Amino acid sequence: MLILNNIMNVTLVNGDEVICNVSKHTELIEGLEQEVCYKLTFPFTVSEINDGQQLNFLPWKKWSRDTEYLVSYDMILNISAPFPNMEKEFQQAAQKYASMLESINYTQSQHDNAPNPGYSPIA
């Protein structure tokens, strides 16, 4: 079961709007832990179907198997709390997506062991 405890609506400066779990990403820089950007976990775009009676969640990066994205602070326009029903439906969509990835034997840790472990686009 996924534990997503900071679900937010995020608007990026390019106009993309996603719902995701938001946390601050820290890195060791010159011996000090420093917050360097946001980490968006399970970002989904949301659309309404059936005349607004149902929400449809799609992965933000639909051609990527990644579930976490580092986004610099200056790329975020604003962050807001979703309605409770949207938060609940997001939790279900994220769990379903995680289960699908698991069914094809993909885990984030496999990706973390890519050819450049420890690589950060920020630091």
Image: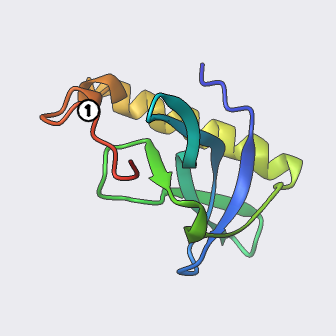
Q: What's the residue at 36%, 43% (across, down)?
A: 66
Residue at position x 77%, y 41% in the image: 88
> Toward the viewer: 66 or 33?
33
- Disc 1 packing (10 Å; few <14; some 14–19; many ≥20): few
At mark 1, the secondary structure is: helix
Which of 16/26 is in front?
Answer: 26
The N terminus, quarter of image: top right
Q: In screen coordinates, is 115 left or right of 68? A: left
Name the image quarter holding residue 10.
bottom right
Q: State the residue lying farthest toward the top.
A: 1
Instruction: Report which quarter residue 11 is drawn in.
Output: bottom right
Q: Position of residue 59 (x, y in %)?
A: 46, 55
Which is nearer the eye, 123 or 97?
A: 123
Q: Amino acid at mark 1?
A: His
Name the spot of residue 46 as percent of width and height, x first.
Answer: 62, 64
- Residue at the extreme left of the image, as rendered: 115
In this picture, residue 68 sits left or right of residue 85: left
Total number of numbered labels?
A: 1
Figure check: 10 above or below 69:
below
Residue placed furthest toward the right: 84
Q: Residue furthest front?
A: 30
Looking at the image, which residue is at 87% across and 54% down? 83
Query: Which residue: 39% across, 33% down?
Result: 100
60 relative to 17 in the view: left or right: left
- Pick the front one: 105 or 71: 71
Residue 32: where, in percent of width, then height?
53, 31
Residue 41 position (above or below residue 114): below
Question: Which residue is label 1 attached to?
Answer: 111
How is colour applied across the structure in the image? rainbow
Residue 39 picture quarter:
top right
Using the image, determine if residue 7 lies above or below residue 54.
above
Residue 50 in the image: state x and y as whole percent: 69, 70
